[in-house]
Image (cartoon, rainbow, N blue to C red):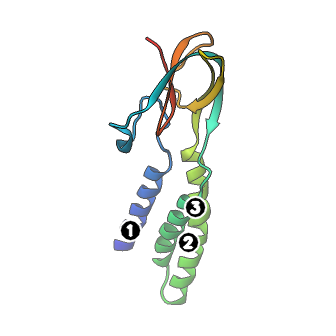
Amino acid sequence: MKKQFVSLGALTLLLSACAPNINSNHYATSGTGAVGQAMNCTVVSVRQVNVSSSDSSTGSVLGAIGGGVAGSTIGHGRGSLLGALGGAALGGIAGNYAQEGLSSQSGVEYIVKLDNGNLRTITQGTDVYMQPGQRCYLLYGNQSRVIPAN
């Protein structure tokens, strides 16, 4: 029973660690109080994109650990060892697929034209949606983002 709780804990960690918040209204604690810069700009182009994690190791490792622990509860002796090995292999594969699915998010890629004529691109979450021709600010520092100029 205790081993099953460990498996459940590993799965919970997997699910909570997969998808970082990419929205423009989200700030990490380390970003608060930091001085950034803002530039006036205009939205030139908007396109929907898919944003996903390029690192699947966390899901694979946590899935393998959870699967190994769960698999070890099957049988006794050699059966327990084989169950753990099989569970770890299957858990690693499942964890990799789970992380890919859970870390995939919809995003928006903006091309903005700065007032000095230079173009910049930025990809962020879909919480703020702007149209071509809309005035905005390009904020940059620790994490860059584009927000509407109110």
Question: Label 2 vs label 3: CA separation?
Answer: 17 Å
- The reply to whether callout 2 and callout 3 are in contact (CB within 8 Å) is no
Q: What's the residue at 51%, 73% (across, down)? A: 68
Question: Label 1 vs label 2: CA separation?
Answer: 14 Å
- Location of mark 2 (residue): 87
Name the element at disc 3: helix
Task: Say whether residue 27 is left or right of residue 88.
Answer: left
Q: Tag 3: Cα neighbours inside 10 Å, few (<14), some, or many (≥20)?
A: few
Name the element at disc 2: helix
The quarter in which the N terminus is drawn is bottom left
In percent of width and height, residue 22 lies at 50, 36
- Location of mark 3 (residue): 57
Q: What's the residue at 63%, 36% (across, down)? A: 50
Given residues 122 and 130, the one toward you in this image is 122
Write down the quadrant of residue 11 in the picture: bottom left
**Three-letter amino acid code at disc 1?**
Val
In percent of width and height, residue 85 lies at 57, 78
Q: Tag 1: Cα neighbours inside 10 Å, few (<14), some, or many (≥20)?
A: some
**Three-letter amino acid code at disc 3?**
Ser
Write down the quadrant of residue 120 in the picture: top right
- The reply to whether callout 1 and callout 2 are in contact (CB within 8 Å) is no
- Location of mark 1 (residue): 6
Q: What's the residue at 41%, 34% (across, down)? A: 26
Task: Judge whether residue 87 can be spotted in this image.
Answer: yes
Q: Nearer the viewer, mark 2 or mark 3?
A: 3
> Is tag 3's residue or tag 1's residue first in the polypeptide sequence?
1
Name the element at disc 1: helix
Most extreme residue toward the front is 116
Given residues 42 and 114, the one toward you in this image is 114
